[in-house]
C-alpha cells in the first residue's frame, strides 16, 4: 500500500514537472557593436569557428568588410562583388555578427505579393513582445529580390556610410531562397540594428546579400523569440579601444541599412 502511495506521489510530481513550461534559453549572440562598424572598425578577433559555437543562423560581415555574411543551417556564405556566394574557411575572422540557434516558435504563411514593408507590418502585428529579440526566417520564392554587398576595404578604413556609397546592388527575379534576419527592439540602438535587419541566400546557395527590398511570390515566415543577449567585444582590437562609440549614429545607420 505504502509503495502504491509513493508511486502515485512520484507520478504526480512527474506530471507537474511536464506541465511546467521549460525555461527558455534562446540567446542572441553578438560580437562588437553596430556603432563600431559604422565608425570603420572592420577587423575583429573572433573566428567563424567560434561563432559557430554560439549559433547556426545569422548575419554580419567579414574582416576588412569583405562582403555580406549569411549563416544558414551552420553554413557561412560570403557575398563577393561578383554577386556570388563563397564559402569562407572557418579560420576567417569577423568584426560583427548577430547569430542564434534557430528553433522556430511560430510559423506564418505569408500572403502572395507581399513587399518587404508589408512583411514588416505583418510581423509587427503578430510578434507578441516588441521588447524582445526575434530571429526571422522567410523561406519561399521571390518575384523580385534586391540585395547589395560591400567591397573589402584597405586601411585607413573609411566610415561605413562612405563605403556603402560604392555598394554593389543585385536584382534577382523569380528566385527561391531564404531570408535570414533579426528584429531587435528600439532600445538596442548603438549596439545592434533596431527593427529589421535581413540578409538573403538563394536556395542553390549561389547568390545573396543584405536585403534592400523584395516581392514575395509565396512563402512562409518562421520566428524564434530570443530573450537572452550575449555580447563579445573585440578586446584585442586597438581601434576599438580608441573609438567613440556613444555618438547617436541613427541617421548614418538608416542610410547604411536601407539605401
Ligand atoms: Zn546587413
Image (cartoon, rainbow, N blue to C red):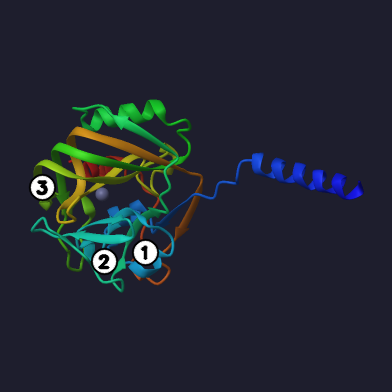
> Which residue reaches farthest bottom?
91
Q: Are marks 2 and 3 in contact (CB under 8 Å)?
A: no
User: Which residue appears farthest toward the right when viewing the image?
Assistant: 2
| Residue on which the image places disc 2 | 63
**C-alpha distance separating marks 2 and 1:** 14 Å
- Residue at the image point whose x is 25% and y is 35% from the top: 219
| Residue at 29% from the left image edge and 67% from the top image edge | 43
Tell whether 105 sits left or right of 23: left
Cα separation, mark 2 vs mark 3, equals 21 Å
Image coordinates of residue 251 in percent, x first then y, are 27, 40
Q: Is residue 179 visible?
A: yes
Residue pointed to by mark 3:
169
The answer for how far apart the CA atoms under marks 1 and 3 are is 29 Å
In the picture, measured across the screen, residue 86 lies left or right of residue 132, that is left
Would you call the spot at circle 1 few (<14 residues within 10 Å), some (14-19), or many (20 or more)?
many
User: Which quadrant of the view contains residue 240?
Assistant: bottom left
Query: Is label 3 within 8 A of ligand 1 (CB to nearest ligand atom)?
Result: no
Which residue is drawn at the image coordinates 31% and 74% (left, top)?
91
What label sits on residue 240 in the rendered view? 1
- Does any portion of residue 47 appear in the rendered image? no
Q: Element type at marker 3? A: strand
Q: Residue 190: where, in percent of width, then height?
A: 38, 47
Tell me the quarter of the picture where residue 187 sits.
top left
Image check: 258 left or right of 171?
right
Q: Position of residue 21 (x, y in %)?
A: 61, 41
Tag nearer the camera, 2 or 1: 2
Quadrant of the rendering where the C terminus is positioned: top left
What count of labels does the image hold?
3
Q: Earlier in the sequence, mark 2 or mark 1?
A: 2
The mark that comes first in sequence, 2 or 3, is 2
Amino acid at each position: 500500500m505504502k509503495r502504491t502511495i509513493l508511486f502515485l506521489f512520484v507520478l504526480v510530481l512527474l506530471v507537474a514537472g511536464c506541465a511546467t513550461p521549460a525555461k527558455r534559453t534562446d540567446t542572441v549572440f553578438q560580437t562588437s557593436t553596430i556603432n563600431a562598424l559604422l565608425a570603420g572598425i572592420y577587423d575583429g578577433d573572433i573566428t567563424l569557428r567560434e561563432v559557430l559555437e554560439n549559433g547556426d543562423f545569422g548575419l554580419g560581415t567579414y574582416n576588412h568588410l569583405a562582403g555580406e555574411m549569411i549563416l544558414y543551417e551552420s553554413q557561412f556564405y560570403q557575398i563577393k562583388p561578383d554577386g556570388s556566394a563563397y564559402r569562407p574557411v572557418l579560420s576567417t575572422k569577423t568584426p560583427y555578427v548577430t547569430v542564434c540557434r534557430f528553433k522556430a516558435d511560430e510559423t506564418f504563411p505569408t500572403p502572395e505579393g507581399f513587399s518587404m514593408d508589408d512583411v514588416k507590418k505583418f510581423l509587427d502585428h503578430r510578434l507578441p513582445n516588441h521588447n524582445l529579440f526575434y530571429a526571422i526566417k522567410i523561406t519561399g520564392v521571390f518575384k523580385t529580390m534586391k540585395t547589395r554587398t560591400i567591397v573589402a576595404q584597405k586601411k585607413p578604413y573609411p566610415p561605413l556610410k562612405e563605403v556603402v556609397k560604392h555598394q554593389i546592388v543585385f536584382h534577382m527575379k523569380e528566385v527561391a531562397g531564404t531570408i535570414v534576419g533579426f528584429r531587435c527592439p528600439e532600445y538596442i540602438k548603438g549596439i545592434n540594428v533596431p527593427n529589421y535587419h535581413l540578409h538573403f541566400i538563394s536556395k542553390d546557395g549561389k547568390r545573396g546579400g543584405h536585403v534592400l527590398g523584395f516581392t514575395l511570390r509565396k512563402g512562409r515566415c518562421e520566428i524564434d523569440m530570443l530573450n537572452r543577449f550575449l555580447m563579445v567585444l573585440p578586446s584585442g582590437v586597438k581601434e576599438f579601444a580608441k573609438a567613440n562609440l556613444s555618438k547617436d549614429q541613427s541617421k548614418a545607420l538608416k542610410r547604411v541599412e536601407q539605401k
